[in-house]
Image (cartoon, rainbow, N blue to C red):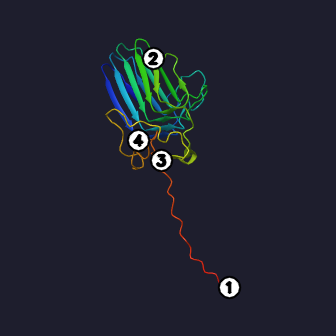
Amino acid sequence: MASAGYGNSVLHLNITNSIIAKNQAKVTGGGMELDVNEVGESNTAFIRVVNTTITGNESNMHDLTGKQDEGGGIRVFAYDGVGASISVELCNTIVHGNIARGREPSEDLWVSQRDPAQAAVDAYCCDIGEIVDSLGLYQATSVINADPLFFDPANDDYHLRAASPCIDAGTATVPAPPGLPTSDFDGDARIIGAAPDIGADEARPPVYLPLLSLGLSVVGG
């Protein structure tokens, strides 16, 4: 959870090359809870998330009725405070396959505000699943909604399969800080291929070993 409160608080947060997976929130924001609130005034937050994978998280883990349970993957909320604002940028990031129990759709990303506070989410070259934005606070550029085709998420393997739509679908133009990372979460070079991949993994091409010629002798008579 990242929150700005208590009056004139300023939060700047950069998240890079991270995997946020299989977390369970009792109430809201299964993967990430990002907010500014009404305690005091002029609370501001800016969060930039780069080449990160957010998947398999759950909000409302006890499936309670009558409770706030938004945002299985990311919940962004600004509420009440005068001058309170939150801005979230998602770059080359996967937010897919998260669950908000008791709510449909599953809410990979949920964003809202309560006046006079302001919230905004801008996504660039991402793979984002279900989005709940009743106020038009979310803006997307070159964003897809597709199964990222992780290798084996059940066993915590979030590398990309060769057929993943996230391969070569990112952008190298990432503002600093932090800018585009020079390696992925494994330490492999980023970029491999025509463009950066979306998510924490930079997929490596398959390695084909040369065939060895076998010397065969034929015995006949």
Percent from the top left, x then y, of residue 72?
A: 53, 30
**Between marks 3 and 2 in the image, the one whose residue lies nearer the viewer:** 3
Q: Badge 2 is on which residue?
A: 113
What residue do we see at 45% from left, 17% from top?
113
Residue 118, located in which quarter of the rendered image? top left
Q: Which mark is residue 203?
A: 3
Separation of disc 1 and disc 4 at Cα?
A: 63 Å
**Between marks 1 and 4 in the image, the one whose residue lies nearer the viewer:** 1
Closer to the N terminus: mark 3 or mark 4?
4
The foreground one among 46 and 6 is 46
Q: Secondary structure at mark 1?
A: loop
Closer to the N terminus: mark 1 or mark 3?
3
Looking at the rendered structure, the kind of residue marked 2 is: Gln
**Between marks 2 and 1 in the image, the one whose residue lies nearer the viewer:** 1
Looking at the rendered structure, the kind of residue marked 3 is: Ala
Q: Quick check: marks 3 and 4 in contact, CB under 8 Å?
A: no
Q: Badge 4 is on which residue?
A: 17
Separation of disc 1 and disc 3 at Cα?
A: 51 Å
Q: Quick check: marks 1 and 3 in contact, CB under 8 Å?
A: no
What residue do we see at 34% from left, 32% from top?
175
Measured along the vertical axis of the image, is residue 219 above or below residue 156? below
Percent from the top left, x then y, of residue 188?
A: 40, 50
Percent from the top left, x then y, of residue 6?
A: 34, 21
Give the crowd class for mark 2: few <14, some 14-19, many >=20 residues within 10 Å: many
Closer to the N terminus: mark 3 or mark 2?
2
Q: Secondary structure at mark 4?
A: loop
Separation of disc 3 and disc 2 at Cα?
A: 37 Å
Closer to the N terminus: mark 4 or mark 2?
4
Q: Which mark is residue 220?
A: 1
Regarding residue 152, the answer to whether it shows in the image is no
